[in-house]
Amino acid sequence: MKSLLITTATVALLAVSSMSFASGADTSAGARTGDAVAYQIGKRVYATQFSCKSCPLSGKKLTKDSAKAILNGEPKVSLSDSDAQALATFLKRRFKL
Amino acid sequence: MKSLHIVLAGVLISSSSFVTAEGTSPWLPIPGQFSSSINYSLQSGDSAYIGDQELDVELITGSGASEFERASTTLSFSYGINDFLALDATIGYGDVEVGNADEDSGLTDTTIGLSWRVTDEYFNPGFPTTTLRLGAIINGDYDGARLAAVGKDANGAEFSILLGKSFTNWFSVSAELGVQERDNDVPTATYYAISTLFYPAPGWSLGLGYSDKTFDSNLDIAGPGFSPDRFQEVAEERSLVKASVGYGFGNHGFALLYNNLVDGRNTVNDDAITLSYTLAF
């Protein structure tokens, strides 16, 4: 009986030892690149500074031409340097400009 | 007797896949961009949950082992097909040691997934970014019926819904709810995760998160109805807290991640640290 208990406990340990690695929820996404972060922030800058209801491009669809125009400063919107850089990353990568 | 234990364990152990794509972001890769990441992870624990009772590994084994250790290296890839579709894949190599009892290594399970962003928070006001992901789990190349099993030795599929919202340029929240189905009598697994991400300075990110995963079963190791041939059917539960720090510039990204198990059932009480580097093209 004692032997059976030891065996069961040992097998149990071995089982959980391997199962400990089972949970996919242990894993995490890989590191994000600087451009990936900037792309996301730039997208938000566009949405909050250019296409919101009170924004200059409200109701207009973002296209390659409108992206080029924004990169050329039209319409003029005051942005911080970091926001402007993020916006440029978004527009250039989104439309391969 | 020890050899008998090992033989029994080798025959009876059900092992689990540890490579899945959970942790995938609701925000898809940049369209047209191919990213590759290499991740090195070390995981260890010196106590385990038998059912919901926590016991020292040394006590359970009669000093046969004081802890388990696992090292894994994974390669993950992603590709932004367009603004709303993306592919991902992960493959890896794992090495497991259980005291002096056994060790093994091998190619871990591979996952391949397709993500579809259904709503974009920036162009669908009032909605979070919502992404659906469907993935395949492909059995790796290892011996699942042994003491130091590398994986669960089963094929399967997974489906998840991911939600994300950026409240400011420096703070975002995301969540994932998913389900996995595997063959070889592995119970259905459901999981959820909640993550927050801060950007305290240009290039830098800090993450905090919590995740929970449950294999849907009423069977405990060494509990009523348990028999050695039913290891793959046990109710495994893992609740984790996660923290990360990352730095990225241009097409490069670095991250250090830490996971700690805060509650569990039929699993090892462990923690893990992971180093990750990403290069995008």
Image: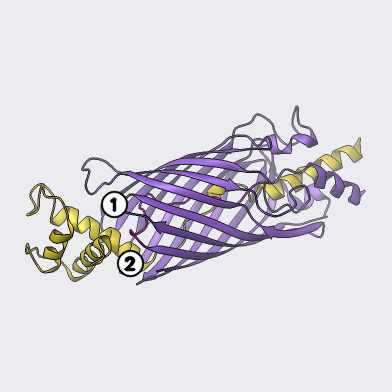
* Residue B77 placement (x, y as % from top left): 48, 60
The numbered disc on residue B106 is none
Please give the name of the residue rendered at 85% of the width and 38% of the height, measured from the top-left corner: A5
Q: What's the chain of the residue with tag 2? A: A
Kindly identify the amino acid type of the residue bearing the numbered disc 1.
Ser
Q: Colour of chain B?
A: purple
Q: Which residues are magenta?
A: B16-32
Kindly identify the amino acid type of the residue bearing the numbered disc 2.
Asp
The numbered disc on residue B166 is 1
What residue is pinned by disc 2?
A: A35
Residue B75 within the magenta-colored segment of the rendering: no
Q: Main secondary structure of the magenta part?
A: loop
Q: Colour of chain A?
A: yellow
- Which quarter of the rendered picture does the C terminus of chain B lie within? bottom left
* Residue B82 placement (x, y as % from top left): 33, 54
Left or right side of B188 for B99:
right
